């Protein structure tokens, strides 16, 4: 059995089978670039990066797209506040976003579509929806006619009548139905484009569908995002795709749970936001990554400093063991590129169970203990196998220990130090030791 993964569209754990052989097309909703990202926003950034790494490890070819929403009321407001153009605001926070992506050890997606590069396509798309009766124009605002799509609510498991009775009714609303959503927004302030409906800008729900279709042409294998995007954003993406292309946009819809501060939702107005940019360095980014990677991806994380410290201790333990074993093997010329097949098959077995990361963590802890035992008993061949297995697994999870092999000079002194100790030449051993300490090797 291959990878089993929870599909939000069917509410079932299903076997992952891409549409075209071993090619996987994946789209994940990216940020609206008007502010720095906080550690809750980093959760999908880390999870989908890990998902891509794992799919590649299984032998799939993955094409991963994540968009930048560079037009939005929030960006327009920020630009007005700061006396800048929307483009300047968006560019600044996009750069900050990718700094944060790097800090938590994620790679840039393969494709990074920007909403403002697809305005013509969006206008075409909306025109077609209007032509087919799925959308209507009221004084320059264009809305999607939700009632015309039979299975609206399929992703969020809600029936239209319940949604309607729960929807807020605004007396000034120009909509036929409170559930209808904006495809094109007439704008008086800020950046705008001309269209057959009048001057304005596209709605967020339309951006993602159009970019998806433009980049991948047909049904995606995976559409991802945070749990909070399920409704209305993803539901509305599906409704539009259903109207024009008669499909649900993606075969697998995957959602990642929220990260809350223990007992409270992170919010700017409450003043309890932790930004990724404020993490001290890349090691702190990696510790946050470990916390996120080893938390079941569909559950809410209750973040606290104690929880982070648990992962910090674990991470530092891994660094110490890895460093010691690496140098000992390296100077003896015993490093191996082989893996322990049993450990790797256990790793796959756990990951394939809809990402049973807690079992993966237990497996890693066991391997680290074994490495320490093998080092003490000087069973170097077996240690070499375990060391390479350990680092292979961490690499799939995107966890970097930031410890490199020694260069030739340092490796030589490391060897001399060990030889001096074995020969009980303490004076020489001390000299080499001091040198190694000075180089930060010990
Ligand atoms: Zn989206």
Image (spheres, grey):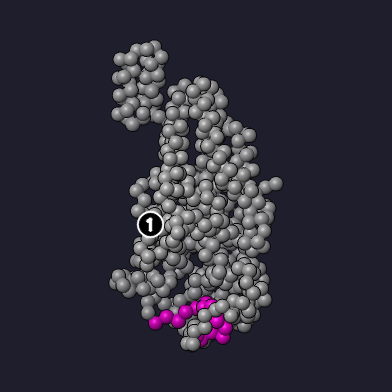
Residue at 43% over, 57% down: 261
Would you say 417 lies left or right of 180 here? Answer: left
Q: Is residue 259 part of the magenta span, yes or no?
A: no
Residue at 57% over, 31% down: 338
* Quarter of the image that includes the C terminus: top left
Of 300 and 86, nearer the camera is 300
Of 302 and 140, nearer the camera is 302
What residue is shown with label 1? 275
Q: Residues within 10 Å of mark 1 (few under 14, many from 20)?
A: some
Q: Quadrant of residue 5?
A: bottom right
Residue at 67% over, 58% down: 12
Magenta span covers which residues? 173-188
Q: Is residue 197 visible to us here?
A: no
What secondary structure is the magenta-colored segment mainly?
loop
Image vertical order of residue 429 relative to residue 21, above or below:
above
Q: What x and y, as percent, mark residue 257? A: 53, 58
Mark 1 C-beta closer than 8 Å to ligand 1: no
Residue furthest toward the right?
1
Mark 1 secondary-structure assignment: loop
Q: What x and y, as percent, mark residue 315? A: 45, 40
Would you say 209 lies left or right of 420 here? Answer: right
């Amino acid at each position: 059995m291959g990878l089993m993964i929870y599909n939000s569209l069917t509410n079932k754990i299903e076997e992952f089978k891409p549409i075209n052989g071993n090619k996987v097309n994946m789209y994940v909703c990216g940020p609206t670039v008007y502010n720095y990202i906080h550690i809750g926003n980093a959760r999908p950034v880390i999870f989908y990066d890990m998902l891509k790494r794992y799919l590649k490890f299984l032998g799939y070819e993955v094409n991963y797209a994540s968009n930048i929403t560079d037009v939005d009321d929030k960006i327009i407001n920020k630009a007005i506040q700061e006396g800048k153009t929307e483009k300047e605001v968006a560019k600044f926070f996009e750069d900050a976003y990718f700094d944060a992506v790097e800090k938590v050890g994620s790679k840039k997606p393969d494709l990074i579509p920007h909403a403002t590069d697809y305005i013509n396509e969006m206008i075409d798309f909306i025109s077609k929806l209007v032509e087919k009766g799925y959308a209507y124009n009221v004084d320059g605002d264009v809305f999607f006619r939700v009632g015309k799509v039979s299975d609206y609510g399929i992703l969020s498991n809600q029936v239209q009548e319940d949604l309607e009775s729960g929807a807020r009714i605004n007396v000034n609303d120009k909509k036929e139905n409170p559930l209808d959503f904006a495809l094109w927004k007439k704008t008086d302030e800020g950046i705008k484009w001309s269209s057959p409906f009048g001057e304005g800008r596209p709605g967020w729900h339309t951006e993602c569908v159009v970019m998806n279709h433009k980049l991948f042409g047909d049904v995606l294998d995976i559409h991802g995002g945070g749990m909070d995007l399920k409704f209305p954003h993803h539901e509305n993406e599906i409704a539009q795709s259903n109207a024009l292309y008669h499909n649900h946009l993606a075969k697998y819809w995957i959602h990642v749970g929220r990260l809350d501060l223990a007992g409270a939702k992170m919010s700017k107005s409450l003043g309890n936001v932790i930004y990724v940019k404020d993490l001290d360095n890349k090691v702190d980014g990696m510790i946050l990554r470990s916390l996120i990677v080893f938390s079941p991806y569909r559950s809410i994380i209750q973040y606290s400093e104690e929880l982070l410290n648990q992962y910090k201790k674990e991470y530092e333990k891994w660094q110490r063991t890895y460093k010691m074993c690496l140098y000992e093997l390296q100077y003896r010329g015993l490093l191996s590129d082989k893996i322990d097949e049993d450990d790797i098959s256990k790793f796959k077995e756990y990951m394939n169970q809809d990402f049973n990361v807690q079992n993966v963590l237990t497996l890693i802890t066991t391997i680290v203990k074994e490495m320490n035992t093998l080092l003490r008993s000087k069973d170097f061949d077996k240690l070499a196998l375990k060391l390479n297995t350990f680092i292979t697994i961490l690499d799939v999870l995107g966890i970097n220990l930031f410890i490199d092999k020694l260069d030739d000079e340092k490796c030589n002194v490391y060897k001399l130090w060990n030889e001096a100790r074995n020969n009980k030449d303490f004076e020489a051993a001390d000299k080499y030791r001091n040198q190694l300490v000075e180089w930060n090797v010990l």
